[in-house]
Image: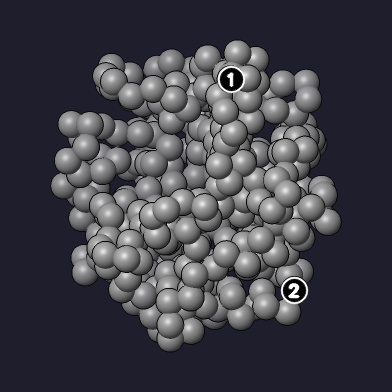
Amino acid sequence: MSARPHTVTALRSWLADGEILGPDGAMHAWYDAESGERSFPYPEITGYALTHYAGRAEPTGAELTAAEAATAWLLRRIEAGNLAARDGWESGGVYYFDLAMIANGLLAIADRRSLPAAREGADRLVALMVAEIDRCGQLPALPTGQVTRRTGWSVTGRAHMGKAVQCLLHAAHATPGESRADLDRATAAVVAQTLAEQQPDGRFRTDADDEVTMLHPHLYAVEGLWCHARATGDSRTADAARAGAQWVWRHQLPTGGLPRFVATGRGQGAGDPPEQLDLTAQAVRAAALTGVEPDAAARAADRLVGVVVDRGGSRAALPYQPESTTRHLNAWVTLFAVQALELASGTSVPDWQLLV
């Protein structure tokens, strides 16, 4: 327990440091601790970073500088019409989940720093999602008509899109009067599609074939429904979020961490899943937010602290999978872990708009 505040400070320092940030302000997916190379710049994760920076009650100078650069980088992309999930990948394919995380980050930093341009950029992205929902009654992973050869939860799943509720609600709360109607309708549609994926035991179906349940998108569904419950007081979404969080802890590993997936149905031959730290951090957060399994969450928080990688200069980061042979220090694992360890140490629950 005593190591957690120091660890949080070290993780925050790394997230505002040049190792994971590009010179243009983008946050990259990971940093290779052996080669010293950064991966691709990641718009979605840069959006998460803005939510993180906006949530700092007393941001450091480095965090303020990083937030300003990240905001400018995202707004340049939006202004240029570049909504690709990654440059040079999938012929510029767009993912609505990514746009939602970018939009929420821009809304959060607009709130904190009084930046009208950030609000305008977010509104453009939200409008695209609302238009898609109006077309098909739900928010799919990809825009209508976009073709991909990829498979898996990020393209065929529906539950993870529940986290887009956060940015829709965020935009609605900043929109006056009758102008909110479209946003309220869109929010209700995404809540409905998320709840439709939940099974009686609390599990969310994360992929169309339902062979395995991927815990990362499962927890995105939990997070979106928690945001909705906090924003609206809806007991239905609060109960669903709690049931989803409770289900996860049935699968905690002896290490204290959590596995990448849980085999369901036809996926019983999928093999042993690796331990994965992004969803471990998410699970710790979900436990604190929904009030479940405090002892199990404490063991998971200790596991996160135990596998932190020291970067010198009072900085530290977390890998994606602790048993991996690569030494990739991961941006979103580290972002999630900051909030997870804060909550595990008794810090007050963040505003729903500021859940990274």
Measuring 32% from the left and 50% from the top, which residue is drawn there? 43
Q: Quadrant of residue 9?
A: bottom right
Residue closest to the eye, 136 or 323: 323
Measuring 71% from the left and 53% from the top, which residue is drawn there? 256
Residue 134 location, x and y as percent? 43, 21
**Disc 2 marks which residue?**
1
In this rendering, position of residue 328 left or right of residue 186: left
**Disc 1 marks which residue?**
269
In this rendering, position of residue 106 left or right of residue 74: right
Residue 92 location, x and y as percent? 20, 35
Residue closest to the eye, 130 or 23: 23
- Work out whether mark 2 precedes mark 1 in sequence or the reverse, and give the earlier one: 2
User: Tag 1: Cα neighbours inside 10 Å, few (<14), some, or many (≥20)?
Assistant: few
Q: Is residue 295 visible?
A: yes
Q: Quadrant of the N terminus?
A: bottom right
Measuring 39% from the left and 22% from the top, which residue is drawn there? 151
- Above-or-below relation of 207 to 336: above
Label 2: element kind: loop
Count of marks, rendered view: 2
Label 1: element kind: helix
